[in-house]
Amino acid sequence: ELKVEQNPLFLSMQEGKNYTIYCNYSTTSDRLYWYRQDPGKSLESLFVLLSNGAVKQEGRLMASLDTKARLSTLHITAAVHDLSATYFCAVESGGGADGLTFGKGTHLIIQP
Amino acid sequence: DTGVTQSPTHLIKTRGQQVTLRCSPISGHKSVSWYQQVLGQGPQFIFQYYEKEERGRGNFPDRFSARQFPNYSSELNVNALLLGDSALYLCASSLKRGFSEQYFGPGTRLTVT
């Protein structure tokens, strides 16, 4: 059974600081996804990582994938309050037939 | 351009009842996926439909079923509701089969009493 673990689960940080969220998964995966969810809202797709060594960047967020270590990271650079949200990673397996397995999410609070 | 729409927004049902949730994908999108998100947890994949056929199924009991119509809209049915079925049910659509470039709807909040 595929397991996806995120850490930390809660993170409070100050504006301007850098931090990294980690996503570990237990078995070989096809693709890895990152999503953002604001309180009481739906999910927003951030990144899809397709292969080992893949790196994607959008603004202050950068995601990377190491399939050998079964690890993805979401790095936040010079955090701003607007990035406060819950971030989920999700792993696709079984060629998609098994769907996506999500982590529990990282609740990120960025304080001025 | 209209995004993914879901109805109803909120729903309260009693244990043992049946419920139908509806999803309209973005125009031109042929794939619809359903997820269950219990409060404080990550979403769990329930089904994916592409071109009106089931293409993926998560680890949910047979009480959960879905279908996709010729206009690519979709319904999720849950029979014999349990208290544990209380959750936010999310629908997502994409152009192609799979999960890349999924756009999520606002969700239906189901409460089972």
Image: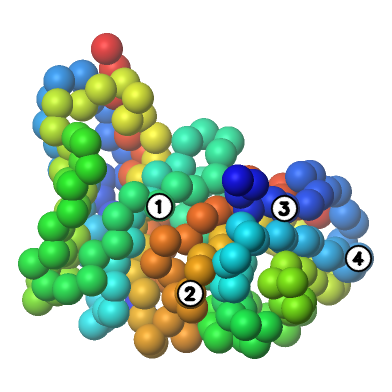
Q: Nearer the viewer, mark 4 or mark 2?
A: 2
- The disc, 4 or 3, on the residue closer to the chain's N-terminal end is 3
Location of residue B58 by image quarter = bottom right
Badge 2: residue crowd in 10 Å (few <14, some 14–19, many ≥20): some
Q: Disc 1 marks which residue?
A: A45
Identify the subunit bearing mark 2.
Answer: B
Amino acid type, residue under disc 4 in the picture: Gln
Q: Would you say the residues marked 1 and 4 are in contact, meaning their CB atoms lie under 8 Å apart?
A: no
Distance from the alpha carbon under mark 4 to that under mark 2: 34 Å
State the residue at coordinates (39%, 67%): B100
Identify the subunit bearing mark 1.
Answer: A
Residue B65: x and y in percent read 74, 79
Indicate left or right for A58 with A77 as reference: right
Labels 1 and 3 in the same subunit: no
Q: Disc 2 marks which residue?
A: B96
Looking at the rendered structure, which numbered label has been put on residue B17? 4
- The disc, 4 or 2, on the residue closer to the chain's N-terminal end is 4
State the residue at coordinates (9%, 76%): A68
Labels 4 and 3 in the same subunit: yes
Q: Nearer the viewer, mark 2 or mark 3?
A: 2
Amino acid type, residue under disc 3 in the picture: Gln
Indicate left or right for B57 with A24 as reference: right
Q: Nearer the viewer, mark 1 or mark 2?
A: 2
Judge whether residue A32 can be spotted in this image: yes
Q: Would you say the residues marked 4 and 3 are in contact, meaning their CB atoms lie under 8 Å apart?
A: no
Secondary structure under the numbered disc 3 in the rendered image: strand
Q: Nearer the viewer, residue B29 or A109?
A: B29
